[in-house]
Each structure stands twice: as structure tokens, then as C-alpha cells.
Image (cartoon, helix red, strand yellow):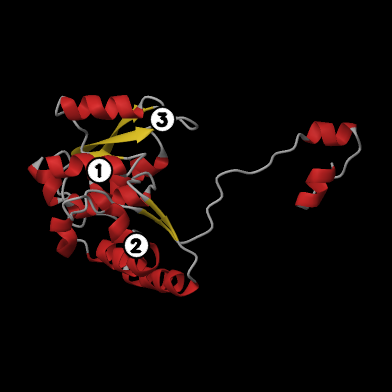
Amino acid sequence: MKKLMKLLPFVLILVIMISSFAGCSLSNNDKEIKNEINNDTGNIKTGSEEPTESNKISPEKITVSYLVTEDIIPMNEDWIVFKEIEEKTNIKMKLVTVTDASYKEKLNALIASDDLPDLLSLIDGEDAKKYGPDGAFVNLSDYMDKMPNFKKYMDKFDTTADSYKVCKASDGNIYQAPRIVDFMWITQSYSVRSDLLKKHDIKTPDTFDEIYNM
């Protein structure tokens, strides 16, 4: 556990990279902020540098357990993203999976048994606010000086999306990292059966009006 705490800032970056660590969700269309964030990526290492034992996050291999929900797409530790993380950082992600329907029950059971995974993808940010002050989760406020890029994003979105207010618990501390969305995020789309289009001699629709009239 001490090793994980020492590597906490780096582990948080990894989790945010795979877009599953979502205690609370913020969206913003402000072009100025979006441009600033895109420009900032020039100061962040992209990982193109070939990893060596000396520049990996952890000098020895460690395993980090990670609670994630899987309803639509089953999570798999054999995914390339997890293999790349392990190869470049020496950190192996051990997935603890649960469905959305059983998430609350699983979370409460883990907290009650004091057997929480190292990291959690929270469906409801209120859980972090509720259980964080009781000691269930790490107080990220204590690590802000070690996470300059995370703090930079939080500060930027605080003026337009209340990033701190959304994530702060009743004791004024932060126990979750928000998923900051600075791009158009489409979660649902229309699909049309091509065999039916062909059967009824209908051309592939190009607009919503054509879909409606189809």
C-alpha cells in the first residue's frame, strides 16, 4: 500500500488516460479553455520515448487492483491498453468487474469489509463525498502539489464548470478525480439495416430528415 501511495499521482494519470476513473463528470464547450488544454499537451510526455527500467514509473513490478463496471463491453486485462501500461510503467492493472445493477451492493460490501480495491471507477460521485471523509478513500487534496497537471485542469474548469465544487465533500476535501470532457462526446447513434434498405430500394440516408422519412 505504501508503494501505491508513493506512486499515486502517476497511477491517477494512467487511470484518467483509460477514461474509466469517473467520480464526477464535467462537460465544457468553452473554446478558449479547450485550446489552452490542447496547447498544454506540448509540455506532457506522450510516451513515445522507449521505456527502460530507469524511466518507468515503478522500478519494480507492482499490481494495482481496479474496480470497473462492465455492462455493454466486458473488460479484459488482455486489452492492449493494459499491456502497454504494464510494459511502459511496470504497473499491472488487476480488474475487479461488476455490473451497473450490482455496483451499489458491491461497493457497500467492499467498504464494510475494508477490502476496497486500490482504485475505483465510481458511477456516482456522491459515494466519494459520502465515504471519503470516513476514511474509505484517499484525500486527493493532500497530493495536489504532486499532481501539477491535474491541478491545472481542475483550476481551469473551476471557473466554468465548478470542478472543485462538484467534487468536494462536506469536509472540503476531494476524494475523486472528475472526468473532464472538452470535446463532443457521442454515446448513442442510429443504425440502419442495410439489407432492408436494399430490399426496399432505399438509398442510405445522409440526414436526420431522410432517416425520419425513410
Q: How many marks?
A: 3
Question: For mark 2, does the 10 Å Cα neighbourhood hold few (<14), some (14 to 19), or many (20 or more) residues?
Answer: some
Q: Is residue 22 above or below residue 9?
A: above
- Hey, which residue is sitting farthest front in the picture? 170
Q: Earlier in the sequence, mark 3 or mark 1?
A: 3
User: Picture coordinates of residue 33 (x, y %)?
Assistant: 42, 71
Q: Which residue is mark 1?
A: 128
Q: Which residue is mark 3?
A: 100
Residue shown at 24%/54% (left/top)? Answer: 168
Quadrant hosting residue 69: top left
Separation of marks 2 and 3 at Cα, in angstroms: 27 Å
- Three-letter code, disc 1: Ala
Q: Earlier in the sequence, mark 2 or mark 1?
A: 1
User: Picture coordinates of residue 61 (x, y %)?
Assistant: 18, 41
* SS at badge 2: loop
Residue shown at 18%/55% (left/top)? Answer: 172
- Hey, which residue is sitting farthest right in the picture? 201
